[in-house]
Image (tube, rainbow, N blue to C red):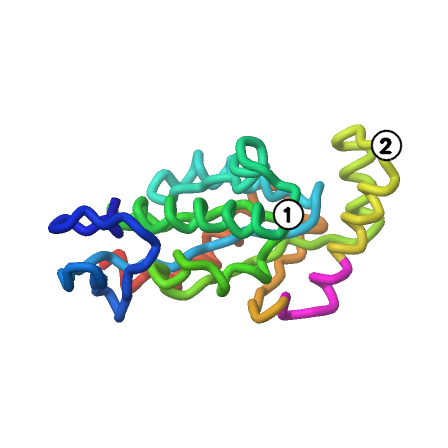
């Protein structure tokens, strides 16, 4: 919507963006838009992203909380190009929701390293990523006992991904922060995530 030229109808992925202005290269028309941050709540399978997102939806209706798995479930996911296109759709939806002034938080595990290589990234302000973490033992317990998962390959891949977040602060060219969830209730984790988002939104919600 916001990136479709109202004069010539150009809806191609070819817009030029400078600050909060969009320019159509076909007819030269320019218009303003609201440029907002993209928030991502990441972490391995079983760490609590979905539970945290559900609590945020309920307690903080001013935030739009969405799960990136919606694209995995309805779009192809076999190639790198497929994953890039999922990101394009996620960012496109984000930029349009942002025109209402509502901050958008996505729960999302992978593809973080691809974000800056997408077309729709130009319509977004800073990208803020917070990864939920826990100990390897806790991740195994949450998956095996909490979710009844028996696939050891899946469980080990989650443990390994969790370890990556614990030992790094960049994934590709994307920096991220971490939040240790161990010993915290789901409500406490949601409160910490909301507290993390607030400073990045303060100036835009005045």
Percent across and percent down for residue 174 are 56, 67
Pinpoint residue 71: horizontal percent, then vertical percent. 52, 38
Residue 122 location in percent, x, y? 36, 63
> Which label was assigned to residue 92?
none
Residue 153 is a magenta residue: no
Q: Secondary structure at mark 2?
A: loop
Name the side, left or right, on which 71 lies relative to 155.
left
Range of residues picked out in magenta: 163-171
Tell me if 29 is positioned left or right of 167 in this view. left
User: Extreme front residue here?
Assistant: 26
Q: Which mark is residue 150?
A: 2
Residue 51 x, y percent position in the rendering: 59, 37
Q: Quadrant of residue 185?
A: top right
Q: Identify the residue position indicated by label 1 in the image.
A: 79
- Compared to residue 177, the image places residue 96 above or below, namely above
The N terminus sits in image quarter: top left
On screen, 153 above or below 174? above
């Amino acid at each position: 919507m916001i990136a479709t030229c109202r004069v010539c109808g150009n809806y191609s992925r070819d817009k030029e963006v400078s600050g909060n202005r969009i320019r159509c290269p076909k007819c030269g028309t320019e218009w303003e838009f609201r440029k907002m941050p993209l928030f991502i709540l990441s972490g391995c399978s079983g760490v609590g992203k979905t539970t945290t997102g559900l609590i945020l939806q309920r307690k903080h209706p001013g935030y739009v909380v969405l799960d990136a798995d919606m694209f995995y479930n309805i779009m192809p996911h076999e190639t790198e190009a497929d994953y890039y296109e999922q990101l394009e759709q996620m960012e496109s939806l984000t930029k349009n929701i942002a025109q209402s002034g509502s901050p958008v938080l996505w729960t999302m595990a992978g593809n973080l390293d691809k974000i800056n290589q997408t077309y729709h990234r130009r319509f977004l302000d800073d990208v803020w990523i917070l990864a939920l973490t826990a100990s390897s033992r806790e991740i195994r317990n949450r998956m095996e006992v909490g979710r009844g998962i028996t696939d050891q390959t899946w469980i080990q891949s989650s443990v390994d991904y969790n370890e990556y977040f614990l030992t790094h602060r960049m994934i590709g060219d994307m920096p991220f922060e971490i939040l240790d969830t161990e010993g915290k209730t789901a409500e406490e984790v949601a409160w910490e995530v909301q507290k993390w988002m607030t400073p990045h939104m303060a100036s835009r919600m005045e």
